[in-house]
């Protein structure tokens, strides 16, 4: 008996020792977790229940000079399903099924197995949301069941009114596990207007610090790219706490930092004029069926671009079409619009006066081993008449008097052979060859606008220098960068690149160019009643790379400005390879009439008064379009 008692006693002691050791180990583990690992597990708990929600920043707008919106952001939502939440039998699924069947949640749990509850919940969601999602109920049901982990994207780009319907339907039908994720989409109110200038953004999907996908808008072309950094805002954040069912506990909402919207970019473009320009160019593009057509209109005193358009172009909404901005990205041989270089250079150097007469060899010059021809048999022509009649021989003889290096210097001074620096993507500098590569024949071709490559913007900028008194200005298409309240934080300044010609030479050139649109000039089709118009026609045989000059194919243009005594606007129209029946393919017959039609709209929209105080009604304008009225 005593032996038995001793055995029991030993076993009890052993059990007590084991229990004591076990409890001691557990106590040590608890102490270790509470003290040594406190920070680790505390942080894990915080990460599980607390969440830093990103608050997206709105991208800045693009506006025209008058404040009309050209590009803006629209708040949209992505409809996302969380499979783990949808399959939560104890919360989301049971609540939805209870609502569907009109039962209490406890009764649903007691009467249906888990898988049947989940299946019924999927059917409930499919029935209530399929119409809003525009997905057939059966397809929606299969989509929800098809993924066990990760997000299920059910719809994108849902606008606010539809999003509100989603919220109401989900609340009314006790649907949980479906979320609306807020984002921004870029919207272009006029997607076929000013497309090359505005450019576009690309939606780039990235993961945030929680590994969740977010959409960022990244500028890819045009103003959207050049000012991408300034227009991109700074996202904000909000610390929120969720319960074990992932619902936010509003009472525990923590710190937040509101997002900062991106800066707005105000352009120099006048959308009233831009719209008319686009309409006129589209009609010409349809009628003449050219390879391409481009037009640029500028304020010669500030260098601001008032309108710029090209065809073909593209749709900002679909991005289908040609995305090349011809006005800055394509070069061409300008022909006779380039003759201002030789003429103004010779005048500026004092080699000739406007009335100096030059013998033009009766239409054929063959004195230096090459031939130059005019379209008429001209004998003696004054410098003015050389421009008025657009004599190739006369332009060369002016350039020859100026000489090669000075002529090259004037080409550079007018901005050719180098980018203008306008705030657009894709600009090229064109081509002017160094003097060391010239021979006398190539020199003669340059004076008449061949053997050089220029962009439409370069020609327009050069004519601004002639119009404004002789200063080459850097062209601008951005007027200012503004905050969300419309306060300018950056302004584009009038920037003088260099003085090209004297004010006296500028006046002499304006007088000469005003006669181009008068009787006997090549640009009479650009004349506007009530205004003295300065201009120059250009006709160049089209050069096909690798094949040479194509017979019967031309690049025609007209560059001009008005009024002659105080130029308010400079414009250029370039038509590449037009096709027309019954009309000669010259700058004066093709480009000049298009230029005039645009100039009429410019005079009306910009309120440019005619040269006298009478009321002028232009023949091309309707009875409702009064250009200018003066009360007696």
Image (cartoon, rainbow, N blue to C red):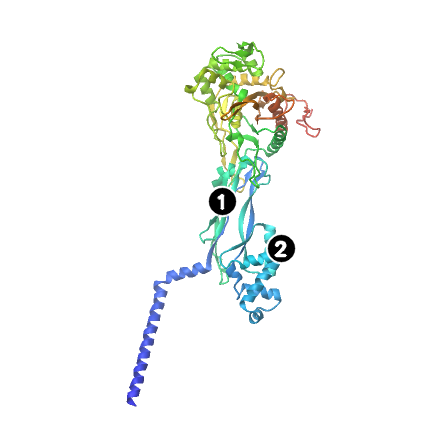
The answer, for residue 369, to whether it is visible in the render is yes
Instruction: Give the residue displayed 61% in from the left and 64% down from the top.
Output: 100
Q: Position of residue 234 (x, y in %)?
A: 48, 46
Residue beneath disc 2:
131
Q: Quadrant of residue 70?
A: top right
The residues bearing labels 1 and 2 have C-alpha atoms spaced at a distance of: 35 Å
Where disc 2 sits, the SS reads: helix
**Residue 152, above or below 597:** below
- Viewer-proximal residue, 616 or 98? 98
Pick the front one: 556 or 208: 556
- The extreme right residue here reads 623
Element marked by disc 1: loop
The answer to whether 313 appears left or right of 452 in the picture is: right
Q: Position of residue 544 (x, y in %)?
A: 52, 26
Q: Mark 1 packing: few (<14 Cα in 10 Å), some, or many (20+)?
A: some
User: Of the residues under marks 1 and 2, which one precedes in the sequence?
Assistant: 2
User: Residue 353 in the image: x percent, y percent?
Assistant: 52, 12
Which disc is residue 233 wearing?
1
| Residue 174 visible from this viewpoint | no
Question: In this picture, is 91 found above or below 551?
Answer: below
* Residue 336 picture location, percent across and down: 54, 20
Q: Dot 2, crowdedness within 10 Å: few (<14), some or many (≥20)?
A: few
């Amino acid at each position: 008996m005593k032996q038995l008692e001793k055995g029991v006693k030993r076993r009890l002691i052993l059990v007590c020792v084991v229990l004591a050791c076990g409890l001691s180990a557990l106590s040590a583990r608890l102490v270790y977790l509470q003290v040594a690992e406190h920070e680790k597990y505390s942080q894990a708990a915080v990460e599980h229940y607390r969440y830093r929600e990103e608050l997206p920043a709105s991208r800045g707008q693009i506006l025209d000079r008058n404040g009309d919106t050209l590009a803006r952001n629209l708040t949209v939502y992505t409809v996302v399903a969380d499979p783990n939440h949808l399959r939560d039998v104890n919360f989301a699924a049971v609540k939805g099924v209870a609502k569907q069947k009109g039962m209490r949640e406890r009764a649903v749990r007691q009467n249906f197995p888990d898988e049947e509850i989940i299946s019924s919940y999927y059917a409930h969601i499919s029935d209530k949301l399929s119409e809003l999602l525009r997905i057939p109920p059966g397809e929606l049901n299969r989509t929800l069941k098809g993924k066990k982990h990760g997000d299920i994207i059910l719809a994108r780009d849902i606008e606010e009114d539809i999003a509100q319907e989603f919220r109401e339907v989900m609340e009314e039908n006790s649907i949980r596990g479906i979320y609306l994720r807020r984002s921004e989409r870029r919207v272009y109110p006029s997607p076929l207007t000013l497309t090359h200038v505005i450019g576009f953004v690309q939606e780039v999907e990235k993961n945030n610090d929680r590994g969740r996908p977010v959409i960022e808008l990244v500028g890819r072309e045009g103003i959207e790219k050049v000012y991408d950094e300034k227009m991109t805002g700074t996202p904000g954040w909000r610390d929120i706490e969720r319960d074990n069912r992932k619902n936010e506990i509003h009472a525990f909402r923590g710190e937040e930092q509101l997002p900062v919207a991106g800066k707005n970019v105000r352009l120099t473009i006048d959308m009233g004029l831009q719209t008319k320009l686009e309409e006129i160019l589209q009609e010409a593009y349809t009628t003449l069926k050219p390879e391409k057509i481009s037009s640029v209109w500028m304020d010669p005193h500030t260098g601001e671009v008032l309108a710029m358009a090209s065809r073909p172009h593209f749709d900002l909404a679909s991005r289908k079409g040609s995305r090349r901005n011809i006005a800055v990205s394509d070069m061409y041989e300008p022909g006779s619009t380039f003759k201002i270089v030789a003429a103004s250079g010779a005048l500026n150097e004092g080699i000739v006066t406007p009335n100096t007469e030059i013998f033009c060899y009766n239409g054929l010059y063959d004195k230096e081993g090459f031939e130059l021809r005019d379209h008429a048999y001209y004998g003696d022509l004054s410098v003015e008449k050389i421009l008025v009649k657009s004599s190739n021989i006369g332009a060369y003889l002016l350039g020859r008097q100026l000489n090669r290096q000075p002529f090259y210097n004037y080409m550079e001074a007018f901005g050719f052979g180098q980018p203008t620096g306008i705030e657009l993507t894709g600009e090229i500098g064109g081509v002017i060859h160094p003097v060391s590569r010239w021979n006398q024949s190539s020199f003669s071709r340059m004076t008449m606008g061949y053997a050089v490559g220029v962009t439409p913007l370069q020609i327009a900028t050069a004519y601004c220098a002639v119009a404004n008194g002789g200063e080459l200005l850097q062209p601008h298409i951005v007027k200012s960068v503004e905050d969300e309240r419309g306060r300018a934080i950056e302004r584009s300044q009038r920037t003088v690149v260099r003085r090209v010609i004297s004010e006296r030479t500028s006046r002499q050139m304006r007088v000469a160019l005003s006669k181009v649109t008068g009787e006997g000039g090549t640009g009479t089709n650009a004349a506007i009643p009530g205004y003295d118009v300065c201009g120059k026609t250009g006709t160049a045989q089209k050069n096909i790379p690798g094949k040479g000059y194509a017979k019967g194919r031309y690049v025609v243009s007209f560059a001009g400005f008005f009024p002659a005594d105080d130029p308010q606007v400079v414009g250029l129209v370039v038509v590449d390879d037009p096709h027309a029946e019954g009309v000669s393919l010259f700058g004066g017959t093709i480009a000049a009439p298009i230029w005039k039609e645009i100039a009429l709209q410019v005079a009306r929209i910009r309120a440019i008064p005619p040269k006298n105080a009478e009321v002028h009604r232009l023949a091309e304008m309707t009875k409702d379009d009064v250009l200018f009225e003066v009360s007696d």
